[in-house]
């Protein structure tokens, strides 16, 4: 793909804007669907959308080649995402206000760096520890509503599910570090493998009941803009970028934009504790990304 920074920025902005709306879409869709129903219909839409993309890119022959090469890895990948991850995540949003569930989801990057130490053999750095302290400090602030001395948590199960979702998402990306295949094809394989498990779970828990038009519309939106199309848009942004740093830094706008959409369309009044906790989480993420670069000493010039 020809490098074009302006086009990459547009792709990246589109992806970030779409991701900023999904917490609102989760909450509104769960008014009409159970978590397992939302997962089923969203996964079907995403599977169809990814299938169309793979066919249009003439990559269908890679489906069997990639699966045949590492079937166990794709089984693990599909069970982790979309099956377990979204089942847990939607259950979390069903229990918690969106403004609380959404910021906690961003701590997965911190957990990923911690899990990479025992599972990928990476070294634990001081920046990772500081980032974890800041991010999980933000989790405590959000969970307690800023009342740290009282330490009263509104929904232990909801917050437990939120943190479990970050574990599942981190494990998914750890598994995918071994994936050498085409990213879009790999994602489609994960959805194809997960779909029977999702179908069986939804049938067992809720039966096969056709949801309302509002529920189907919400599931379609989630399937397209959370699970499928936006991922491809982000890949295009990274591949066409001359410099990736401006693209990746746009991700930090997403949680704050998300709070705006939650307040506007879900009607939640955003609490001060949410802003405080989110600020700590974002500080932790920035610390993790930028900290090591600040420690780098510039090389001396020949004239020095």
Image (cartoon, helix red, strand yellow):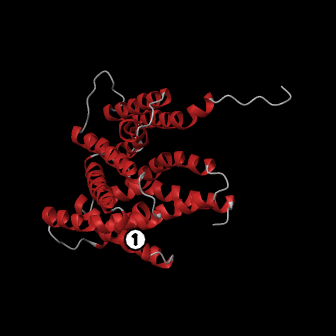
x and y, in percent, of residue 295 in the image: 61, 28
Residue 113 falls in image quadrant? top left
Residue drawn where x is 44% and y is 31% of the image: 124
Between residue 139 and residue 262, name the one nearer to us: 139
x and y, in percent, of residue 20 in the image: 47, 54
Residue drawn where x is 68% and y is 58% of the image: 5
Quarter of the rendering occupied by the N terminus: bottom right
Residue tagged by mark 1?
65
Residue reaching furthest to the right: 303
Rendered view: 255 above or below 12: above
Q: For the residue labelled by badge 1, is the local secondary structure a helix, a strand or a loop?
A: helix
x and y, in percent, of residue 29 in the image: 32, 61
Residue drawn where x is 34% and y is 47% of the image: 171
Rendered view: 100 above or below 237: above
x and y, in percent, of residue 243 in the image: 66, 51
Q: Residue 285: in sight, yes or no?
A: yes
Q: Residue 30: in sight, yes or no?
A: no
214 vs 244, left or right, is: left
């Amino acid at each position: 793909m020809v490098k074009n920074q302006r086009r990459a920025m547009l792709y990246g902005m589109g992806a970030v804007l779409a991701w900023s709306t999904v917490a609102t879409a989760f909450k509104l869709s769960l008014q009409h669907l159970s978590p397992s129903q939302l997962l089923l219909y969203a996964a079907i839409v995403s599977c169809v959308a990814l299938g169309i993309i793979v066919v249009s890119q003439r990559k269908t022959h890679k489906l069997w080649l990639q699966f045949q090469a590492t079937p166990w890895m794709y089984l693990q990948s599909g069970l982790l995402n979309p099956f377990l991850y979204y089942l847990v995540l939607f259950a979390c949003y069903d229990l918690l206000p969106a403004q609380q569930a959404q910021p906690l989801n961003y701590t997965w990057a911190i957990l990923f760096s911690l899990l990479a130490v025992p599972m990928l053999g990476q070294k634990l750095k001081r920046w990772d520890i500081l980032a974890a302290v800041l991010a999980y400090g933000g989790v405590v602030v959000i969970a307690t509503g800023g009342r740290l001395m009282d330490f009263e948590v509104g929904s232990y199960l909801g917050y437990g599910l939120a943190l479990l979702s970050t574990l599942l998402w981190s494990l998914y990306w750890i598994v995918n570090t071994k994936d050498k295949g085409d990213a879009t094809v790999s994602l489609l394989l994960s959805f194809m493998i997960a779909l029977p498990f999702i179908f069986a779970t939804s049938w067992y828990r809720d039966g096969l009941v056709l949801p309302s038009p509002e529920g189907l519309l919400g599931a379609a939106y989630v399937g397209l803009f959370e699970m499928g199309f936006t991922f491809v848009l982000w890949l295009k942004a990274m591949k066409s970028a001359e410099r990736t740093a401006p693209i990746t830094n746009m991700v930090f706008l997403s949680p704050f934009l998300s709070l705006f959409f939650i307040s506007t369309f879900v009607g939640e009044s955003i609490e001060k504790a949410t802003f405080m906790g989110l600020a700590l989480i974002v500080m932790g993420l920035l610390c993790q990304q930028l900290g090591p670069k600040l420690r780098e000493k510039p090389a001396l010039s020949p004239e020095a």
